[in-house]
Every structure is written in C-alpha cells, then in structure tokens.
Image (cartoon, rainbow, N blue to C red):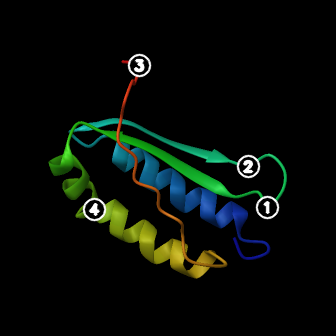
Amino acid sequence: MKPGQADAFEAAAAQAVAGSRAETGVLHYDLWRETDGERRYVFNELYTDEAAIEAHRGSDHYKAFGMAARDLAAGRPEIHVLSAIDVAD
C-alpha cells in the first residue's frame, strides 16, 4: 500500500470480501495481512470451478475493488493460481 492508505484499502477490501462471499461457487474468500515486514495483504480464495472464478471476475464488486485498489496500492498485485490437492471442507 501507499503510505497512509491501509485503512482505505481495508475498507474497500471489506466490500469486495462481503460481495465475494455471497457469490455462488465461492467456497471461501478471506483477507489476510502480514503482521510484520512490508505488511502485505493476501486474498485467499477457493472456488468450486472455473465458471465460478469467471463469474467472480465479472462481478461489480470485483471491478469496483480493482478500481479502488489501483489508486491505493504501491505496485501491481502478485497473483498466484494454485490447484487444490487436499483441501478441508
């Protein structure tokens, strides 16, 4: 985050999290913050399938958060796409 923008980011992220958790096909959608170091944020998301991911990316709250985060972030986000191997219910 840009200096002094953590509260604004977290407020915008709270809207995205709430909207995402209400989507069909979202198994979990959580936001984490690093406790020390650079204090980075991590969204941990799990979907039922690719269709759910595409629906998420097309949602209004996803797009609104992207616009807000663009102005608050110090750089581009890192996105890591993982395949589930053994995930608890």
What is the distance, in whole Å, between disc 2 and disc 3 at their CAs?
23 Å
Q: How far is disc 1 from disc 4 in space, using C-alphas? A: 27 Å
Q: Which residue is mark 2?
A: 34
Mark 2 or mark 3: whose residue is earlier in sequence: 2
Query: Which of the marked residues, 4 or 2, is nearer the chain's N terminus?
Result: 2
Q: Where is mark 4, residue-wise?
A: 57
**Closer to the N terminus: mark 3 or mark 1?**
1
Nearer the observer, 9 or 50: 50
Residue occupying the point 40% across, 24% down = 87
Mark 3 neighbour density, 10 Å: few (under 14) some (14–19) many (20 or more): few
Q: CA distance from mark 4 to mark 3?
A: 24 Å
Residue drawn at point x = 39 percent, y = 70 percent: 64
Q: Which residue is mark 3?
A: 88
Q: What crowding class fits label 1: few (fewer than 14 Cα within 10 Å), some (14-19), or many (20 or more)?
A: few
Q: Nearer the viewer, mark 2 or mark 3?
A: 3
Say which mark, if any, is on residue 38: 1
Of callouts 4 and 3, which one flags the residue occurring earlier in the amino acid sequence?
4
Q: What percent of the width, then of the height, locates residue 25?
A: 22, 38
Task: Name the spot of residue 13 as percent of width and height, x first.
Answer: 52, 57
> For the C terminus, which image quadrant?
top left
Mark 1 → mark 2, Cα distance in angstroms: 7 Å
Q: Which image quadrant: the N terminus?
A: bottom right
Residue depicted at 25% across the width and 61% down the height: 59
| Amino acid type, label 1 | Glu
Cβ–Cβ below 8 Å for labels 3 and 1?
Answer: no
Element type at mark 1: loop
Residues at circles 1 and 2 in contact by the CB criterion of under 8 Å: yes
Decide which of 59, 51 is in the foreground and name it.
Answer: 51
Horizontally, is 69 left or right of 19 in the view?
Answer: right
